[in-house]
Amino acid sequence: MSKLVSCLLVFGLGWATLPACAQVEATAPVAPDPAVAVALAAALPQLTTLTPRQVDNVAALGQVWGLLKYFHPAVAAGQRDWDAEFLRQLPAVLACQSGEQRSRLLSAWITGLGAVPACPACAAPPTKPVRLRTDLRWAQDKRRFSAPLRQQLAFIAANRYQGAPYYVGQLGSTTLFPHEEAYAEPALPTQGLRLLGLCRYWNMYQYYYPYPYVLDERWSAVLPALLPRFAEAGTPLAYRHAALALFAHVHDGHARFYPPDPLLEAERGAYQVAAEVQFIDDQAVVTSVRHDELVPTPPLEPGDVLTHFAGVAVADLVRQRLPETGASNRPAQLNTIAVNLLYCATPQVAVQVVRAGQPLRLTVPAVAVGTVPAAQPAAADSMYRFLTPEVGYIDMARIKAAKVPAIMRAFSHAKGIVVDQRNYPSDFVTTYLPGFLLAQPVTFAKFTQRDPTCPGRFLWQAPDTIKPQGLTPYTGRVVVLVNEKSRSLAEFTAMAFQATPHGTLLGSQTAAADGNTTKITLPGGLKTLMTGIGAYYPNGRETQRVGLAIDVPVRPTIAGLRAGRDELLDRAIELITKPHG
């Protein structure tokens, strides 16, 4: 009798007595046929709502399905059409009347997948320090799963698949999910596919998100909380709003529709007011108004506090939108709301503002979305320029790596440089530009990456280093401006400047969405992102949700806006030009 056959026989007799068998060498993956899953989902009875029992049943199925997807050798190796398996199991699981009945069903399903050979190597400690361990507490919940099922799940987790995974890949430091069917048509997938999509997303964050410990609630509670909403979504828009609510639960600044969803874009309005708004002390304040004659100039002024828009109080709009606005922290949420606040359904919109303490009612013109010409920069604006004879300025929204040597030559005798990072960098200069400020290498960040041998485990990586550029480092003060618009690469770049000898961060809490992104596709062709690596300061200080460590806190004020001042810029110039006591 072969060793494999003996393992299979003993496997069927009991999990605890399974001998130490070698991992089975996987055969070629079986490419799933999406038509099968579509047909299975279409054949399911459509439920008007889910009872609490059904919610718990589907949540249990989704959790077990996900563990098997990433841990069980027959599934992780791509030997099963796993979307179709979820849909095949769904009717019987929905019909279960007790946790014990459900456990028997799931246990039989697992046994039918075949043997899981023991994996002695799985118990070996990883070669790098552990930042995050796999959290399988849900799988040991005695109230939800029987003892035999808990034993099965624990054995599979302890003897996880060690071959090339079918559902997870890697490109550099970026995690990939290469074999996830989009089921792009129709815009509203059937109920079964919607439930499948929610379970897919839940398990991706369960095992491949580096920051589950910063969530406001237990991740295991989010799945049952949102299952009814996904089940009941009766229109394409309702389904998309359910997805927005899901994104908001992860508090991940990268969790948004990317690219923007056309149906949601259309819903916000066909017109937009040619102005910009920022939330200051929880008030929507006009920060800029177009006056270039390319669009009708709205009768708004910087410093106006917007209290009502299109007949609705702004405070009510904020309350309505916050539960569906994904971001790491409240300032970043309010920034997203501000970006979308001035869209409307008509070419004119009624607004109410408070200007210099006086309430005003205004009728404001709006321009058809997509017809607004790009704002023309002022003649004095450029990628870099002198603000004063002593102070240089770099606009990171326009930066180009090829221009960096010329920029640093131009500023070589400046007393200081202001780096405006209240935007997204137009080029990757994260370790290049700050290198001109260094005489010797310096570490500025360290990261965690997923352990490819163990889903849910993240390991510390070697710190990232900035190396000197050029022969003579710039020794003047460098003040980097940041706020809630500073996101992802902007934050990463600001951290690099902050690590230089004379780098200072000035501003307010950043968007707190550091680290690279992983693409996620959900049924209906919905596309979103997930932060895929953990980003930290060299001393281990967090950046996710809390943002960067601000050296000099400064926020704009309504009075400053009314006076036409950029208070962050003014304070930066003051730091550079005035002597320090």
Image (spheres, rainbow, N blue to C red):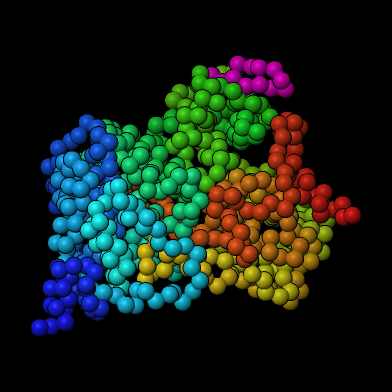
Please name the residue shown 20% across and 48% down the image: 100
Asked whether 141 or 439 is in front, the reply is: 141
Please name the residue shown 72% across and 35% down the image: 557
Coordinates of residue 578 in the picture (x, y in percent)? 87, 52
Coordinates of residue 278 in the picture (x, y in percent)? 61, 36
Image quarter in which the N terminus is found: bottom left
| Residue 481 against residue 413 in the figure, above or below | above
Among the 4 quarters of the image, the one containing residue 456: bottom left
Coordinates of residue 158 in the picture (x, y in percent)? 32, 68
| Residue 463 against residue 68 in the figure, above or below | below
Image quarter in which the C terminus is found: bottom right
Coordinates of residue 446 in the picture (x, y in percent)? 57, 66
Answer with left or right where residue 525 lies relative to residue 270: left
Q: Which residues are magenta?
A: 350-361
Among the 4 quarters of the image, the one containing residue 171: bottom left
Please name the residue shown 39% across and 31% down the image: 267
Would residue 427 be seen by someone viewing this image from the given angle?
no
Would residue 26 be seen by someone viewing this image from the given angle?
yes
Please name the residue shown 87% across and 55% down the image: 580
| Residue 427 against residue 283 in the figure, above or below | below
